[in-house]
Image (cartoon, rainbow, N blue to C red):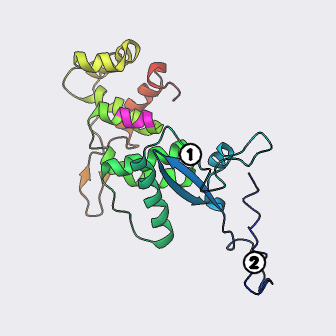
Amino acid sequence: MSDPTVPDLPTERPSGRLQGLPHPDYCDRRNLFLQIDGTIYSIPLRLTSEHLADLAKGDGPDTPPGESVNDPLHLESISRHEMESFLDVMNASWIGGRPRLGEKGWAGALYTATKLGFHAYRESITNEMESTVRKLEALEMLGLAVRCQVKDWRSWAFQKLCERSGPLTGDEGQKLGVEATVSICGIREKLARKPKFPCKGHQCWWGVRKDMLGCQCTSCSYVLDMIKAEKPLNLEF
């Protein structure tokens, strides 16, 4: 693929002459074309991620896929809904405001940003989703954390399982696997022998303290440190 840092210079106009000097940043008319389930999308080439640009690079003499709407780069692991949710976020960053996405839309946008290597958007979406993620059930949170590769959310899910009063169910143990279940049960046993201090939570501006999963208070850090010490709970994504 051609260098995205070099502007696509228009060399002809109706008069046959270039009427002005193309701007090095804002005169790039090239796009990277992507196809998902029969639908074609485009992203300005200079705004694409390094990882996505690498996917579109060709090894042979032929024009690499993605440079033309007639020969888009095919993406297999992302759905149309996920791509469109991410593009809603990308467009909102240009025009201002907050995209109107539900929980599924934000999750889809985060997955797309993760898969395609849009690191700045990924960080922004992760921050946007934190309050919603904290309300999820432990295994639902864990599934989202693994799919979108967010280590903090994975630790929060295990923290929920370690701190709750009820025991792990057979279905949870089956989904977690033997090693992770043993690690969680070991932490639960330690907490039963030596209960942690009450969570100091998050102090709101009006002075009311609220429990906040994954907060950095001494009490939560005590549990999170035990989780981080367990290898089965910290496998690479």
Residue visible at 39% across and 55% down in the picture: 128
Give the SS element for disc 1: helix
Marks 2 and 1, how far apart in space? 29 Å
- Along the viewing direction, whichever of 34 and 108 lies nearer the viewer: 34
Q: Which residues are magenta?
A: 142-147
Asked if residue 110 is among those painted magenta in the image, a careful observer would answer no
- Along the viewing direction, whichever of 31 and 69 lies nearer the viewer: 69
Classify 131 as above or below 177: below
In this figure, which residue is indicated by the disc labeled 2? 22
Find residue 126 and report its horizontal and vertical position in percent.
44, 49
Circle 1 residues within 10 Å: few <14, some 14–19, many ≥20: some
State which quadrant residue 11 falls in. Answer: bottom right
Circle nearer the viewer, 2 or 1: 2
Q: Amino acid at mark 1?
A: Leu
Q: Which mark is residue 116?
A: 1
- Along the viewing direction, whichever of 27 and 58 lies nearer the viewer: 58
Ranked by sequence position, the earlier of labels 2 and 1 is 2
Give the SS element for disc 2: loop
Answer with left or right where residue 2 lies relative to residue 52: right
State which quadrant residue 51 falls in. Answer: top right
